[in-house]
Amino acid sequence: MITQMSKRKLILALTILPVFALAQTEATDAPATSTPIEIPVSESSSAPASTSSPQEGDTSQETLPSDMLENGANPQSDTSATTTVSAPEVAAPTATTTDIINVIEPDLEEVAEVPVEDLIPRKEYTFELTGESIAAKETPEWSQTPEEKAVERAEASTSPSSSVTAIPSIDSESAPNTLNVSGACDDPYFVVLLYKNEADYDQSPSSYIFNRAYPCLQGQYSYSISELPFNMQSGTFYLLIAGQGFKGPWKPISALIPVGITVTTIFPEASTSNESTP
């Protein structure tokens, strides 16, 4: 006969048994975990003791300073961990795109200033009469009208054509490199012409070498030839003086005068101050 006390113990056992069985099952399924125990590093110790035995032949042990341990953790708490020491970062040299060039300026010698006109070659002319004067046509062919040409051809068989034989006054000695020409004139202007060939004034009037026109003052003309074209070469030329009105072409008022002209080119002399010395 079961007592009252035995019933209570039986009910208590039946109540605890399922709970205990469930706990056993959970304990079997879940992996075992352990709570890590932190071991503080003693401040009085400058370096932790090594737990590994030294290799054969090595009688000393290397230790790391305590200030190189990260976060104060003991490297011996985990025998599989290794201590990593990071070296300070060194900045790589940067390339520059600007190159430094040393410019060496040579010593310059002072050069004397020379006026520009002294550096330009100049021409000198020598004038000389080389032959007898040649009568010029009073009315050159290029200036004749068709009627005048017809009359001239008709009169050519009976009378000589009109010509100009006046000779101007010519002086080539009173001034060096100059030919002075003067004479009488009736037109408002006089023209000084210089041709390469004898017939050019009549057949090719625009082929002149020299052409200058000035007012005829008080019935007289006077002109000094001292400047000629720079590219002109030495040779014999034909001088002609013509009269020019306010209208119409010029007409000869003098005979053709053969003139020999010698052209000399004068180059500027080198200054001694510009000569370089070794």
Image: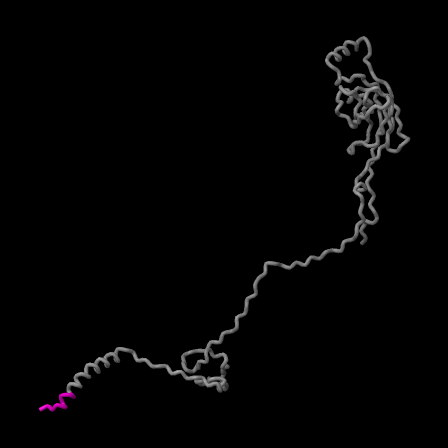
* Displayed quadrant of residue 183: top right
Looking at the image, which residue sits at the far right? 174
- Compare residues 53 and 43 and report the one nearer the observer: 43
User: Is 90 positioned to the left or the right of 191 in the image?
Assistant: left
Which residue is situated farthest in the top direction here? 158
Residue 176 or 72: which is nearer the viewer? 72
- Magenta-tinted stretch: 1-9
Residue 132 seen in render: no
Q: Who's the residue at 61% across and 58% down the image?
A: 98
- Kindly identify the residue that appears in the image at 76 percent across and 54 percent down: 108
The answer to whether one can see residue 32 in this image is yes
Query: The N terminus lies in which quarter of the figure?
Result: bottom left
| Residue at left offset 59%, top offset 58% | 97
Residue 28 in picture, x, y percent from top left:
25, 80
Task: Name the residue: 82% across, 27% down.
Answer: 236
Residue 102 placement (x, y as % from top left): 68, 59
Residue 169, image x and y in percent?
Answer: 88, 24
Which picture quadrant has residue 142? top right
Q: Quadrant of residue 220?
A: top right
Residue 218 vertical position relative to residue 46 in the rendered view, above or below: above
The x and y percentages for residue 215 are 82, 25
